Image (cartoon, helix red, strand yellow):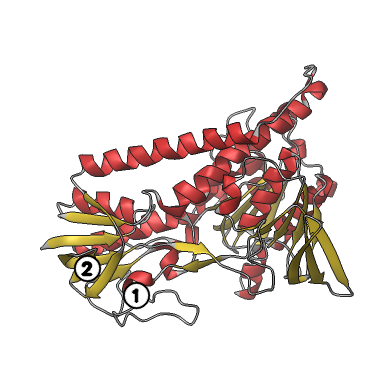
Amino acid sequence: MKDLVIIGGGPGGYVAAIRAAQLQMDVTLIEKDALGGACLNRGCIPTKAYHYNAKILHELEKAKDLGIAIQNVQFDMKQAKDRKDAIVNNLADGIKKLLGQNRVEVISGTAEIIDQHQVKVGESLIDARNILIATGSKPAGLPIAGADLPGVLNSNEILELTDVPQSLAIVGGGVIGLEFASIFNRFGSKVTVIESEPRLLNLLDVEISKRMLVYLKKAGIIVHTDTAVQQIYAADNRLTLTARGRKEMCEIEAEVILLATGRQPVTDCMIRTGIELTRRGFIKTDQNFQTNIPGIYAIGDVIGGQMLAHVASEEGIAAVEHMAGINTLVPYHAVPSCIFTFPEIATVGMSEEEAKEQGIDYKTGKFQFAANGKAMTMAETDGLVKVITDQNETIIGMHIIGPNASDLILEGTMAVSNRMTAKELIGTIHPHPTLGEALAEAIRDIRGEAVHLAPKCR
């Protein structure tokens, strides 16, 4: 009998497998597709590869402002795709080697849970003391006419394009939609975003999402908020999307339409088990990630919550440590989230609106990248750092929109996770000249002590 059978080899499943092996468990991991899951193969890594292509294109466009003359810049989408595929394959091979080095048995196939201690793969039955479901999520469809037409793609399919579409309409103004909007805008597509909610990125701090709207429009991206898509139809080799806004109907033509309307859990492996689900179809678990059936655990996207690769990995570690008798809690109050738009967005902890809703007597500090020397040298001055503390000046949230936000947020994550105070960070020397100085100044601004802000701006 195996100590643990894991279903799903994504960032939750393979990390859990390696941690379980470190804890001396005999582990089998079952994956029906490719190791690394959606994140590596169809999400985080492929889009970041394209994001870098888009960033370099923009750098070349503004080179003349830096005294550099470049002519006849051309972009080859197929070559970019080949590079993206090579990166993905290299990382997937690395995961396979790591699992082998940790003596994790890997089986390729579709798994089905028979009961709380038995999993079927093909014609084989595997007995296990514990089972961990890490099957992730898949793109959610949109129940409208025309959603299945050629040229209407989901977030997996758009990554396989070998040519840049002249025009791209994106249904959904969340993280996935806006990352693709930013990327293909810089690839040269005419991009239109349609969002049914009143504002984009509606889970973010309002000030940050409003700033993002300004930058999208500045980049030439057309945005329709509070607009619901009605149908899609094809005519004259073009796709047309009809949508209802607050005041009137509108029609949007595009060569390609991306449906970026969220993700749904993959739960095919446990249909016959009696595992309890939430109203939205996610698996219910307790704080140790155990389902209502003892010995069966679930982590990652399949349980809902913050559907992020690094969250799934932490949940996987916590779940297998619980199996080994180690009590580990995931610090959900300090989960960083990064959005690879232009400029980048990164956030951790509470937004200003959440602090208000919880009745917290909060303070905010802000600092613009336009006043940061390093940002000026990079010609990347859009954005700001926003810090939120409680009445005791304990840092409860940090929100960054600007250059390298995804790297800068680590300092905020450490502060929120360890419930550090503004005083502790004010006493930490930040090197000069760096983007990190903007964080230090935003924290000082909580007390009205920012050095590089004029008094009238406070």
Mark 2 nearby-residue class (10 Å; few <14, some 14–19, many ≥20):
many
Taking depth in this image into account, of 126 and 458 the one nearest to the observer is 126
Taking depth in this image into account, of 85 and 396 the one nearest to the observer is 85
Residue occupying the point 26% across, 44% down: 99
Residue occupying the point 76% across, 44% down: 189
Label whose residue precedes the other's in the sequence (2 or 1): 2
Name, please, the residue furthest toward the right: 247
The residue beneath circle 2 is 119
Q: Position of residue 406 (x, y in %)?
A: 57, 44
Side of 329 relative to 453 (left or right): left
Name, please, the residue furthest toward the front: 236
Q: Does residue 229 sit above or below 438 in this rendering?
A: below
Side of 19 relative to 38 (left or right): left
For badge 2, the amino acid type reads Val
Q: Position of residue 175 (x, y in %)?
A: 62, 56
Which disc is residue 286 wearing?
1
Q: Position of residue 265 (x, y in %)?
A: 46, 68
For badge 1, the amino acid type reads Asp
Q: Does residue 337 sit above or below 59 in this rendering?
A: below
